[in-house]
Image (cartoon, helix red, strand yellow):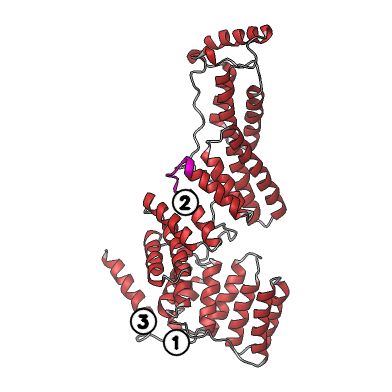
Amino acid sequence: MLVCDLLEQERFVRWTDPSRIDRRVLWCLVLVCLSGAICSPVAIAQRAIPRTSWDEKTSQDPRPDLPGLLDAPEQSNPATPSDPTVDAELAKRTQNAKEVPGGVPADLQALFDAAQQARAVIELNSIIERCKNIAGDSTRIVSERNYTKKLLSWAANRRGELRSDMAGEMVANRQLAEAENLDRAALDDFRLAIQNDPGRWRAHHNLGVLMAIAGDFSKAIEAFSKTIELNPKFVEAFHNRGEIHFRKGNHNAAIDDYNQAIALDKQVADLYSGRGNARFALGQIEAALADYQSAMSLAPDSPKIATEFADTCQSLGRWKEAAEAYQKAIKADPNYVRALQNAAWMMATCPEDFYRDPDAAAKTAQKAIDASNGNLTGHLLDVLAMSQAAQGEFAKAINTINQAIQITEEGPLRSEFAEHRALFQKKKSYRQPPPAN
């Protein structure tokens, strides 16, 4: 490690050691990160599950190579061998194909070339329609029709990926109806791809992604399992299936999937944080914390992973570690809403006086609301209300919690907010209970 790194590490230790600093200094990194000078815009609408398996650098779905289509004349379509007209047309096509280098018909060569250049939905539309025409042409030999089905499958899957990615952008821009329409079209594309080439594992994976986004976890698991059957080395399928198992509460199954994914690739930080979440849910606390630490070492600039570790430490009453991790997350991304929200909660409600700072909590809670880009939630307002109450601003806190109740539909959550309001009406602030052993 360089000397400058050692000095920076020493400065960080000094700033977070309760025996050596005033409590307000502990949160100075949070407040510094909230200054407008270093804030950078960030998209809030992120999905835990990658929308598609497409990756320009590492995960391209290769277009089917042109085969030696006419090497096996006996593959002629068995449904039309006795039709003289069809036989004549087939003979003509065969003769024309022989005149093309490599024995590939000119129209298939043109289709392949177009697929090589296709980058937009409109280009893929044309390729898909041309493939459908050839695949349904009974005068074509079997190898030609089979090839066009595979190319059609590739093009349909790629079109679905483009549509799904556009849907993700629509969600980020709060254009939810448009996003829903695009996702439906993408679903149709992935199904068309599978229909024409059942072995196209990327289409199965992408179908699973959209099923998960739609909340149909059973079909998502089915699609990811099929992906793994077809390609048992595709890490993302294990990762995504593990995420779905976790959301369904099948924590042991989730851990199994994360274990298999990590065995395939030990350098993916999200795999360790995902396994950490599942282990924590099962009460395997130290193992979970070790996974979070591994994840942070692999992705030191990830605000998401640092926040997951901080949230876990806060729930365990490990306040110093939680504060350091929240600082790390907010330094990495000053607009990361989850880190801002949960750091503010801790500063407003921590049972230990040293880690409680109502003024910093209120500023951080307001920053979380501003960073949400209009995606206001009851939780965000509840944290702000807690901060206001901790400042002794009970009238403001009551007004804010009333807004939280008004925009919240879930009955249990509304009841929780109402309990907080009752505290404020008695001019009392909330404190987290001491963590259980």
Is the residue marked by circle 2 packed among few (<14), some (14-19), or many (20+) residues within 10 Å? many
Residue 216: where, in percent of width, then height?
A: 62, 54
Which mark, by number, is residue 118?
A: none
Q: Which residues are magenta?
A: 229-239
**426 in relation to 86, above or below:** below
Residue 29: where, in percent of width, then height?
A: 45, 74
Please give left or right for residue 293 compared with residue 399 in the image: left
Please tell me which of labels 3 and 2 falls first in the chain.
Answer: 3
Tag nearer the camera, 3 or 2: 2
User: Which amino acid type is shown beneath numbered disc 2?
Assistant: Phe
Residue 410: where, in percent of width, then height?
A: 69, 71
User: Which amino acid type is shown beneath numbered disc 1?
Assistant: Phe
Residue at image mark 1: 354
- Residue 111 visible, this orientation: no
Residue at image mark 2: 238
**96 in relation to 314, above or below:** above
Dot 3 lies on which element?
A: loop
Query: Nearest the camera: 339 or 222?
Result: 222
